[in-house]
Structures are given as structure tokens and as C-alpha cells.
Amino acid sequence: MEAFLIESLNNSQRRWLAMSLLILVILVLMVTIIWPLIEQSHQNEERINNLTKRLQRYKQVAAGKTQVSEKLDALKAKQNQNNQFFKDQSYALASADLQQLVKDTINQVGGVVTSTQVISAKNEGQFAQVGIRVQLTATIAALKDILYKIESTRPILIVDSLRIRSSKGKYNRKLRKRVATDKLTITLEVSGYMQHKEE
């Protein structure tokens, strides 16, 4: 039947049929074989471009490594030179320095230290918190100066807790009664930080 149909076609029609079949075969080959190869080639090229860009970024980062390490070393040196932390490498020495610093501050403004107590250390990463509890008597004006000096001194100190009680006053023997006084009984918890030595 098909042979009969082809036989019934003239030469021009046969040529068109042959051309159509050839084009159809080429299209099938392109869709099934050549097009996927081209698509794979484009994907590979895009992947290569992305990897090349990433490699260039990594090279730039690697080239800047020396600058970054120099900046880091400078920051570490600056941090070691600053006076924000206690320089002592032991907690006992740092707490002794803190006690002396707070006592001197209180005495400078006319307060009187009645007792001091060291608070146990708290490790916070590469830092250790150094703290003391101080009991003192002072006027309200002296307390204001004490707090200002503690908060503005170096190394950095922090007032963690403040309790104020009014004083009962002094007993006057002549008057046979207690006389009011402007002195306050104050309990301060003050802390600073020391940096752990890098190993």
C-alpha cells in the first residue's frame, strides 16, 4: 500500500517527501542527541564561570590574609596596651588592686571604709570578673563623688550593687539622746575585669 502511494507520486513530490523525511530525521536527532549535548555544554560553561569567579574571590581573600593578620596583631597589641582591664595575672593580685583603688577613692572624698570582702571570681570567656564588697560611711555628697570616681576610673569598674541605710546617729551624753547625723551606711559591690593570659 505504502509502495503504491510512493509509486503514484511524481518526481517532484518524491523529492519533497524525501526532503521532509530527511528534515524530520535531523530534527529528531537534534532534539534527542544534539540539543541535550548543547544544553549540557552551556551548564558546564556556566558552572566553570561560577567556579572561576569563586576562585578569584578566594585568591583575593588569600592575598588579603597578611593585611588581616597584621590588623589583628595590631588590635591585640592595642588591647594589651589599653588600661581597661587589670594587668595582674592572678585573681588575688587583681582583687588586692581593686580593694586599694576603691579604698583610695573613698578616702579621697572623705568617706570611711569599715570593711571589705572579696567576691569569688566569675569566668566569662577570656575574661575573669574581679569583685569586692565594701561597707563604708559617707555623706550623700561624698557618695555622689565616690560613684562618679569609680565609674570614670581606669581600669573600668562597675558598681554592681548599692545599698544605703541611714545612720542611727551618735549618742550625745550631755543631751542624753541620739543626735541625727548626715552620715550614711553604704554597702557597695564593685567589679572589674582581668584578661586571661593567652597561651
Image (cartoon, rainbow, N blue to C red):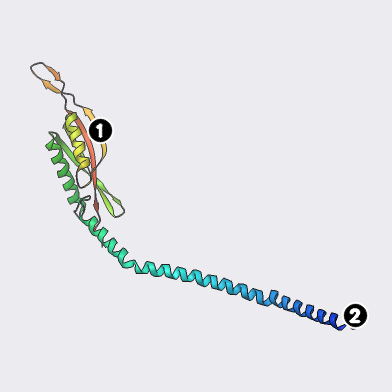
**Residue at image x 79%, y 77%?**
20
- In the image, residue 162 lies at what x, y percent? 25, 35
Q: Quadrant of residue 26?
A: bottom right
Real-space Cα separation, disc 1 to disc 2, in angstroms: 113 Å
Q: Which residue sits furthest front? A: 12
- In the image, residue 179 lies at what x, y percent? 14, 20
**Residue at image x 53%, y 70%?**
47
Mark 2: few/some/many CA within 10 Å (<14, 14-19, 20+): few
Q: Are marks 1 and 2 in contact (CB under 8 Å)?
A: no
Circle 2 sits in a helix, a strand or a loop, which is it? helix
Q: Relative to 78, is 179 above or below?
A: above
- In the image, residue 128 lies at what x, y percent? 26, 51
Q: Relative to 29, is 88 above or below?
A: above
Residue with the mark numbered 2: 5
Circle 1 sits in a helix, a strand or a loop, which is it? strand
**Residue at image x 54%, y 73%?**
45
Mark 1: few/some/many CA within 10 Å (<14, 14-19, 20+): few
In the rendered image, which quarter contains the N terminus?
bottom right
> What amino acid type should be assigned to the residue bearing mark 1?
Arg
Mark 1 or 2 closer to N-term? Answer: 2
Please state which of residues 54 and 73 is positioned toward the viewer in this rendering: 54
Of tags 1 and 2, which is closer to the observer? 2
Residue with the mark numbered 1: 163
Q: How many marks?
A: 2
Q: Quadrant of residue 79?
A: bottom left
Q: Relative to 88, is 33 above or below?
A: below
